[in-house]
Image (cartoon, rainbow, N blue to C red):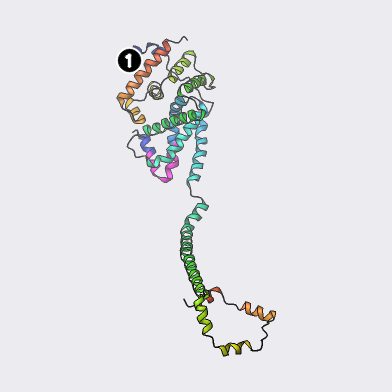
Amino acid sequence: MDDLKKIAPKLSEIKKENPFVVPPQYFDNFSARLQIRIEAEKVAAMPSRKKQIIYFLKPAFSLVAGLALIFLLVYFPLKNHKNGQLANNTNQNTELTDENYISLIEGIDEELLYAFINEPVINDEYSDEELVSYLSSATSDFEIYMEIDF
Amino acid sequence: MNNDDIDIIAGFKLNDKKDIAFHILVKKYKEKLYWHIRRIVLDHNDADDVLQNTFVKIWRNIDSFREESSLYTWIYRIATNESISFINSKKRMKYISINNSHNSLEKKITMEPYFEGDKIQTKLQEAILKLPKKQMIVFNMRYFDEIKYEDMSKILNTSVGALKASYFHAVKKIEEYLNNTHY
């Protein structure tokens, strides 16, 4: 205090008092108001039921997602690869050069050809029921692929 | 560390006594911390917000209190940091410079409904508000709260020498302001 008188005489003359005040009962009510916030903190800190469910299901979700990813990575490239091979085989069969065509024509027995031409016309008309039963028994893509020799 | 604080810390370590320990801590420190915060932020409602935030932070972090410092200096450090963060965020929100913020704080003193100082007290508060933030905090802690330099050093993480120098400069500036102002 003596030091303060020496370096700041004006300041040392001022009575050291608190000019600020608080509303009535402020400190009495403060603890109760704070307690409400602390209780809210406790609730916020607790993991919610929704979070708990997600926590337990997380490994299952990860497993399913992993399997789905493996399926996508394996199935589609394999499918594309097989489709490509089927397309190649079809192209090989349908592409007929002039040389091949001539050798094919030359290879046909004339007598057999005339006999085939002179054969009576077979009635190729099918009834609707026959067509439906044929279509319903049509083999799947997979069965077609299986019967193709690669 | 005094015995009360030792008991409070021991209470926090026991789950079933944590609430009681916190209640004792709040009861012991709420007024001291309020006035420490109020002298920094000035407004009562702001001081109330900062005080609540301070205690919430103490509640959240008491488990990580390592007892390397005393409980008293630890909670004062939290209160001081909360007050400074509050002032900085308010300044950013209002887009005002440090000088302008001082002007607005001066107005705040006279307009503050919970200020009952006479003319000379108002002048003293104005002089304190003109100080740089750190000098203002050091002056308030030493002059009003009479906190030892050693404790202030732990609270503000500043050397005792630097704190003494800050206080000396603050006193000189306040004296100069009082000499140049008629009241």
Q: Element type at marker 1?
A: helix
- Say which residue appears at 39% left-offset and 38% top-offset: B8
**Residue B152: x, y in percent?**
35, 27
> In the drawing, does residue A120 fall left or right of residue B24?
right
Amino acid at the residue labelled 1: Asp
> Which x, y percent locates residue A108?
54, 86
Asked if residue B72 is among those painted magenta in the image, a careful observer would answer: no
Q: Residue furthest top?
A: B182
Q: Is residue B31 above or below residue B116?
A: below
From this viewpoint, is residue B161 visible?
yes
Instruction: Note whether residue B47 is visible.
Output: no
Question: Relative to the observer, which residue lies in front, B154 or B159?
Answer: B159
- Looking at the rendered structure, the number of numbered marks drawn on it comes to 1
Q: Which residue is mark 1?
A: A3
Q: Main secondary structure of the magenta part?
A: helix
Quadrant in the rendering for residue B145: top left
Range of magenta residues: B9-23
Q: Chain of mark 1?
A: A
Q: Residue at x 49, y 74 (%)?
A: A92
Looking at the image, residue B112 lies above or below residue A87: above
Q: Residues within 10 Å of mark 1 (few under 14, many from 20)?
A: few
Towards the viewer: A135 or A9: A135
Does A112 sit above or below residue B53?
below
- Seen in the image, is B133 located left or right of residue A24? left
**Which residue occupies the foreground of this view, A55 or A22?**
A55
Q: Position of residue B1 (x, y in %)?
A: 33, 33
Q: Which residue is at 30% across, 24% downward?
A: B161
- In magenta segment, residue B15: yes
x, y percentage for residue B9?
Answer: 38, 39
